[in-house]
Amino acid sequence: VSTLINGFEFFQPVELLSIIPDRVTVNGGDLITISGFGFTENNTIKVGQLFETEASKIDDNNITFIAPALVKGRYSVSVANVNGADLLPDALSTYEKLSIESIFPRAGPINGGNSISIDGTGFIDTTAVLFKNSTSVIDSIIEERTVRLTAPPATSQQEQTVDITVKTDEETTVIKNGYSYIDQTNNSKRIIAIYPKTSQLAGGGTIEITTYGFDHIERVMIGDRVAVTCTLSDTRTVT
């Protein structure tokens, strides 16, 4: 009789069950956990066909890795080690972080009901837009970059400028004083709001001024200085 000590080994083949979270930002940096079987001390992660890295073993059933920077899309995730390999197809999706680049128009009637477009990034199906505390009706979201909505009524029958809050499942961003409700029964010429209210000393930035009652604008003065260019983009907004 002869015995070979440790001469044979049983092993668990690699099997992937889940990935959490399964949605991360395109910027990368998120910690991702993969659950399954057959993990060893040395596991190679592959995301799509572009990125490969080593994972950290938490225990026999969980490993982690840091998400890389990726373009927006869906990616398969695979794990390979001496026990074999397995793949989760389309397991990881990436999204752009929530941002707001422009709002048009920036003003409307107190009773709401007018159409507004918000351009930016990171708008998904669950996006909600609030005007102060009132939720707007989302009409459409185009390629996660444009939200078209119907403005809600103002919270009171008074001319006012309110914050716009945009929310998704992952993020919230607020544009302070982003929208003005205009009392259209008051026909006096007036400036209602200015956005933004600050500028670098060298100037050169774009400022939007919400007005009412003007048929045309000849010039805009900031203090004793005349703005270099002045465009009346609609009946209420000067840029």
Image (cartoon, helix red, strand yellow):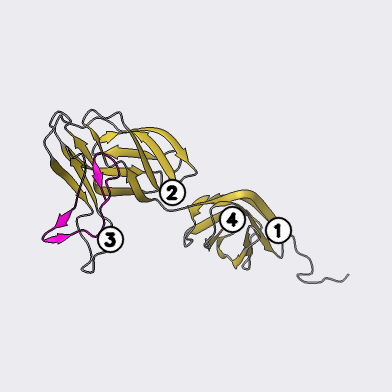
Q: Tell which tag, 4 or 2, sits nearer the viewer.
A: 2
Please tell me whether residue 222 belongs to the stretch shown in magenta: yes
Residue 58: image x %, image y %? 53, 62
Secondary structure state at the residue bearing disc 4: loop
Three-letter code, disc 2:
Gly
Quarter assignment of residue 155: top left
Q: Rounded to the nearest whole Å, what is the CA distance between mark 3 and mark 2?
A: 25 Å
Residue 185 appears in view: yes
Q: Rounded to the nearest whole Å, what is the CA distance between mark 3 and mark 1?
A: 54 Å
Secondary structure state at the residue bearing disc 1: strand
Q: Rounded to the nearest whole Å, what is the CA distance between mark 4 and mark 1?
A: 14 Å
In the rendered structure, find residue 122 and report the number of the disc placed on it: 2
Q: Which residues are magenta?
A: 218-239
Three-letter code, disc 3:
Gly
Please tell me whether residue 1 belongs to the stretch shown in magenta: no
Three-letter code, disc 4:
Asn
Q: Tell which tag, 4 or 1, sits nearer the viewer.
A: 1
Q: Rounded to the nearest whole Å, what is the CA distance between mark 3 and mark 4?
A: 54 Å
Q: Give whichever of discs 4 and 1 has the lower sequence position.
A: 4
Q: Give whichever of discs 2 and 1 has the lower sequence position.
A: 1
Q: Which residue is mark 3?
A: 205
Residue 86: image x %, image y %? 69, 55
Three-letter code, disc 1:
Ala
